[in-house]
Image: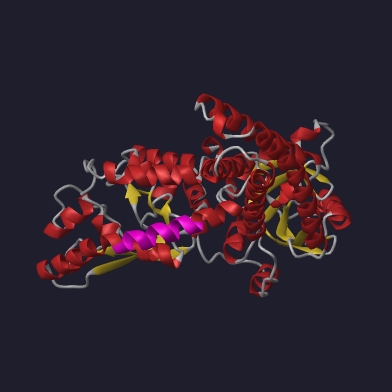
Amino acid sequence: MLDHVSKQTAAGESGRQLSPQAESIIAAPVERRISGAVVAGVAQVVEAVLLALLGYGIYEFYVEIGHPAFYIPVILTACLLANVLFNAVRAHRIAAYRMVFTQLGRVLVAWTVVMTILTVGLFLLKAGDHFSRVWLVGWFIGGAVLLLSYRLALRALVQRWTAQGRLRRRTVVVGGGKDAENLIEQIRASASHDIELLGLFDDRIDDRSPETVAGYPKLGKVVDLIEFARRTQVDLVIVSMPLSAEKRVLDMLTQLWVLPVDIRLSAHMSKLKFTNKAYSYVGDIAVFDMADRPISDWNLVFKWVFDKIVALTALILLSPIMLATAISIKLESPGPVFFRQNRHGFNNELIKIYKFRSMRTDMLDEAATKLVTKGDARVTKVGKFIRRTSIDELPQLFNVLKGELSIVGPRPHALQAKADNQLYYEAVEGYFARHRVKPGMTGWAQINGWRGETDTIDKIMNRVNHDLYYIEHWSIWFDVYILAMTPIRLFDSENAY
């Protein structure tokens, strides 16, 4: 995807002037809705608990072989594995809950895999004498019935909330004219309870793209959508362009790919017919999935919990080191202990990150217009040590607790940081796509050796490529691995000055 993303200088701009219609939407309060992440999270927990209770209940009331000490760990392990597989097949998403056969098929296949692994595992461990075959078969069949019943009930509940408009996604259309009008009519007919349409964005300014389409205003050009989505919540972008307009579609994607939103290409104008598996649906409208929000639904809750637990634990365990660092900084040179600097955060929003001060106060470079190099006279003796060991980054644990940073994610760069005398976003294609997730204290690039000085375009390109790889392949286990490897990689301080 990186090869298809333009430099997007405009993506780095802030405060872009928007149309009065767009400003009025931004100023209007956002209606309170049920969070899809919360629905998916609660549904996931309830499902796992019900499966565990069923497994133990079958043992308690119908089985006499074995002790609970054997059954309970196996039941919990199987439920955890089922939960992982259900997420792997994307069965815990609002879109999945609305389906019938696709949802049930994925869940039943995953449950069958879980029970197969469980049976094979007990056989290989020669633990069969402690477990009842009646229990295994009973839990498999009972679990399948439970999952079918639970998923159908969950679908009915989600459909009810959808009909009430409580799960509506804030949506904009890219495109205009008659094609967009037809799309909007289809949204009204089949997806009005699922979609809250805000307006349209279109680069054309001639008669083919009037200022109002089917009662909805044209809010600006596609580049304006980038600023619009940063200042108000946008969940979904539907592109109303024919598949034959390949260049227009590609140009649009190169601009919008930097945003943390779902992007769908409507197939309502296409004369080409694909199999049903090629489409997803918004109401009854067939669409192609062009881009997904990198971390969504229940995964947001997983990552939030992970960040808070790790940050609090780290603050407690590392507080002696942080206190000693603060005292050392004060003893060596006059000035504040902490250094605050503006960085780009999630969705390109400006945040202030905290660091231990590592430079002399009379030579501070708050905009980071000049990178720190080896033997840099601006860096104090204490500063050299804490920069090499990354101790200077520890105050960013407070940024994590404030919700501005994650423990793991693309590192936030200084706004004026340059490589080979070029600003990062000018030097690297797709640079701002790394802001589709919350930045982190450590990341995939850092544990692969791309930390410290980035004085050449090749270095920053490699860092960005690793950041984009992380975003595309994110999982909570990926975060755990990166976190575990970070202390080990700190010993490699070749590029950290």
The residue positioned 84% from the left and 64% from the top of the image is 215
Whether residue 284 is visible: yes
The residue positioned 74% from the left and 61% from the top of the image is 168
Residue nearer the viewer, 161 or 226 = 161
What is the quadrant of the N terminus in the image? top right
**Colour style of the rendered protein structure:** secondary structure
Is 310 one of the magenta-colored residues? yes
Q: Is residue 255 left or right of residue 159?
A: left
The residue positioned 75% from the left and 48% from the top of the image is 151
In the rendered image, the residue lying farthest to the front is 64
Query: Residue 477 at x, y = what percent?
Result: 47, 43
Residue range highlighted in magenta:
304-316
Residue nearer the viewer, 303 or 251 = 303
Q: Is residue 334 left or right of residue 63?
A: left
Q: Is residue 342 above or below residue 442?
A: below
Q: Is residue 486 above or below residue 20?
A: above
